[in-house]
């Protein structure tokens, strides 16, 4: 299955999601790509440290888009099911469930805020 994000092409295969980030906007310079890799790794580590559920990132590497620009190839865990946003828009889901989901997301947001807001959800 192939999807398209705002700045990425996404393939889903079995238990993994493969993304090529940066292609649609023309890519990143080498230093930008390096910095983005560091940010992604830090974000993944911080979410784990704060015990916030998220797809685990298994691999991130630079890929050349053209002679001067790079994209990032990302392999991450596939989590099946609806997103919180999809639940909130589903008219079949009760208001109680939607409110509980919002409380859960707020709880995660408060963990990030309490930790000094080094990342955002």
Image (tube, rainbow, N blue to C red):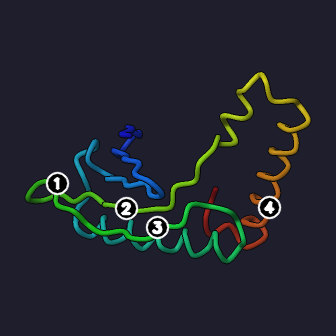
Residue 52 percent location from the top left of the image: 70, 65
C-alpha span from label 1 to label 4: 38 Å
**Residue identified by numbered label 1:** 65
How far is disc 4 from disc 2 in space, using C-alphas?
A: 28 Å
First in sequence: mark 2 vs mark 1: 1
**Lower sequence index among marks 1 and 4:** 1
Please indicate whether residue 68 sits to the left or right of residue 59 in the image.
Answer: left
Q: Are marks 4 and 2 in contact (CB under 8 Å)?
A: no
- Compute the Cα span from label 2 to label 1: 15 Å
Occupied quadrant, residue 89 = top right
The label number, if any, that marks residue 110 in the structure image: 4
Do residues under tags 3 and 2 come within 8 Å of each other at their CB atoms?
Answer: yes
Residue assigned mark 3? 40
Give the SS element for disc 3.
Answer: helix
CA gap, disc 3 to disc 2? 10 Å
What residue is drawn where x is 40% and y is 39%?
Answer: 6
Alpha-carbon neighbours of circle 3 within 10 Å: few (<14), some, or many (≥20)?
A: some
């Amino acid at each position: 299955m192939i999807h398209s994000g705002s700045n990425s092409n996404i393939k889903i295969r079995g238990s993994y999601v493969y993304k090529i980030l940066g292609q649609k906007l023309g890519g990143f310079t080498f230093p930008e790509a390096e910095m983005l890799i560091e940010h992604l790794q830090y974000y993944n580590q911080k979410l784990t440290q704060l015990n916030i559920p998220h797809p685990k990132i298994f691999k991130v590497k630079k890929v050349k888009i053209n002679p001067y620009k790079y994209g990032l190839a990302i392999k991450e865990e596939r989590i099946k099911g609806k997103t919180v946003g999809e639940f909130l828009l589903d008219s079949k889901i009760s208001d109680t469930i939607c409110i509980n989901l919002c409380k859960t997301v707020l709880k995660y947001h408060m963990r990030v805020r309490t930790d000094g807001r080094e990342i955002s959800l």
